Image (cartoon, grey):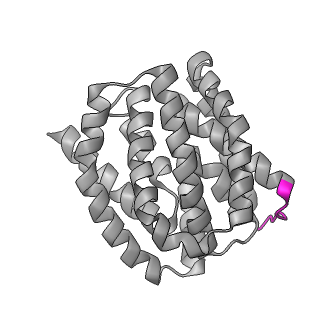
Amino acid sequence: MDSFILFIFIILFASILQTSTGFGFSIVATPFLLMLFEPREAVQINLILSLVISCALIMKIRKDIDMGILKRFIFGSLAGLPIGICLFLLMDMTLLKLGISILILALTLLLILRFRIVQTMKRDFAVGGFSGALTTSIGMPGPPILLYFSGTNTTKEKLRGTTLAFYLFVYFVSLVIQVIFAGTSRNIWMSSLAGLPLVVVGLVVGQLMFKWINQRLFRLLTYVLLLFSGVYLLLQQI
């Protein structure tokens, strides 16, 4: 019963966050899902439910999508996706997560200290590749994009729209790759099905929240989530 209640809280909170900001489901859900499921199951449940959210919102947020950046993210991810699945299958996940956590914390600190970068086409491709690799390896594509958009002072509308559109592609391809190379199970799909009603509630509440989250609060929330993901991954490996 305790596990079921925790599952409800994780999926509901992560769905609200993803809908209201365009990011956060994988950052929040994946670490806690790993407390309830084995890594393969946690990653695939995350991919399935995140894909549902992106599908549900894509028509509503299409006007906020930067198509140029989106295309470069997608092309970049095509190189990163196979690298990620190789890391998932071959590399010690402890070392991988430790390295990622240190990188996230270092870059977040730079953002808090108001370090800013200029958005370029080459950086768009690189961020897409890094995000793709993290999607198939640990199921968390958000941090690279979140760091990049925060560093370039992107508006919350553009960030949410472009990120959700990219997720629609990268989550679908990542799920297919995961199922082919890592396999799947009945428990994964039944757990995802059980989470769908919670996702629907999260979609409604998240849309309402998006209307009153201003740019300053949005940026603060970004830093909190990045710090959370970095600290959690670090503590998990210590």
Q: Which residues are magenta?
A: 112-121
Quick one: quadrant of the C terminus? Answer: top right
Which residue is at the far top? 90
Is 117 a magenta residue? yes
Q: Is residue 1 above or below residue 218?
A: above
Residue 197, by quadrant, is bottom left
State whether residue 213 is above or below residue 36: below
Give the quadrant of residue 124.
Answer: bottom right
Query: Which residue is more in the foreground, 167 or 139?
Result: 167
Q: Position of residue 94 (x, y in %)?
A: 57, 25
**Is-magenta flag for residue 32?**
no
Residue 56's spot in the image, x, y percent?
Answer: 40, 62
Quarter of the picture containing the N terminus is top left
Looking at the picture, tell me which residue is in the foreground, 223 or 38.
38
Query: As drawn, is 108 to the left or to the right of 23?
Result: right
Picture layout, residue 35 above or below residue 131: above
Q: Is residue 119 visible?
A: yes
x, y (%) of residue 95?
63, 25
Q: Which residue is situated farthest in the left direction here?
A: 1
Q: Main secondary structure of the magenta part?
A: loop
Residue 139 vertical placement versus 19 (above, below): above
Q: 87 and 80: which one is in front?
A: 80
* Left or right, 220 with reference to 2: right
Relative to 143, is 48 on the left or the right?
left
